[in-house]
Image (spheres, rainbow, N blue to C red):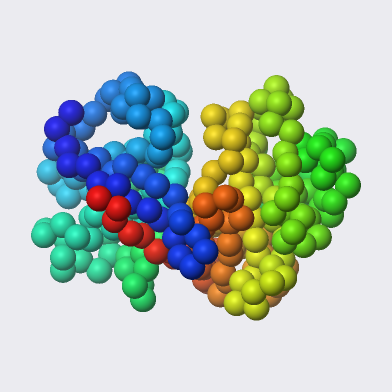
Amino acid sequence: MDSSKYIIRTFCGIGAGGNVHEVHLLDAELSENAMSDVSTAYSDHIHVFIFISSSGAIQNRTYFNGRSVRFCGSGTLAASKILFSLPDMLGQTRLSMLFTHQSVDVFRSSGMYAMEMKSNLSERPAPLAKWAPWLGSYAKHVLTATHIGNAEDYIVLELPDANAVRYAVPNFNAMRRNGGPALIVTAAASRNPKEDYVMRYFAPQYGNDEDVATGSANVYLMQYWHKRLNKKRLMGRQLSKVGGVFYGEIRGNTVTLKGRAERVK
């Protein structure tokens, strides 16, 4: 595989180490099997494969532990960090990346990188009796269960406060057995007046017990908390062990998600 490789942390900040990615800037397209094999062999972080076609189209394919990721927000930020530093891109203010199911615009904003997406939040109540047990003994703390996105996307369990989110212990065995959507636990922020909400993300059924900093989930959560807090600009924090920080703005059905991206090597 002919490529340049970069290690990038995204959605990092004060108290947040962010998510680590290996970005591969390819000289030629790779097959799905080849990209899967690379991410299986080096499974300690997310792999982002970027190929710029002769027409200038930017293709983004992301893999984790051998699995294709339909859309990875943190990987998109990592790719943006590299693309905007390329000599041919230095004059560009906005780029568009092509994924398997959608395209996403990216740009630089106030020292951060941002992605802009049209996202009509499909939100409907979910039965507590079915989904709350995924939190084991913490099930009694669940206030509401909400299914957001498509059928395979996310179940959101809202908890009473940040501590309930921080110390929640999911039942990974039950989640692996039953499959289904990834789990987000969230609550309104209570400690830092600059923060609006906190969250954690779990998907053991897809090979990722707990993600460090999940951009795609926060695109939805920005809309979720926009409705509940009636705020157009929000800041969220992911309470994983390493942590992530997210900034967002809602304009109609458009979500702009921003975060920091730092090159490790």
Is residue 17 left or right of 204 when viewed as pictured? left
Nearest the camera: 11 or 88? 11
Displayed quadrant of residue 48: top left
Using the rendered image of the protein, determine whether residue 36 is visible from the camera's viewpoint. Answer: no
For residue 44, above or below residue 245: above
Residue 138 position within the rendered picture, expressed as x and y whole percent measured from the top left: 82, 45
Nearest the camera: 52 or 9? 9
Nearest the camera: 20 or 53? 20
For residue 74, above or below residue 236: above
- Picture residue at 23% right of the left edge, 60% below the top: 84
Displayed quadrant of residue 106: bottom left
Using the rendered image of the protein, determine whether residue 21 is visible from the camera's viewpoint. Answer: yes
Is residue 220 left or right of 101 when viewed as pictured? right
Residue 147 position within the rendered picture, expressed as x and y whole percent measured from the top left: 71, 46
- Picture residue at 16% right of the left edge, 68% below the top: 91
- Picture residue at 72% right of the left edge, 39% below the top: 170
Residue 152 position within the rendered picture, expressed as x and y whole percent measured from the top left: 61, 36
Quick one: quadrant of the N terminus? top left
- Picture residue at 44% right of the left edge, 60% below the top: 12
Residue 171 position within the rendered picture, expressed as x and y whole percent measured from the top left: 74, 33
Nearest the camera: 132 or 148? 132
Query: Total label count?
Result: 0
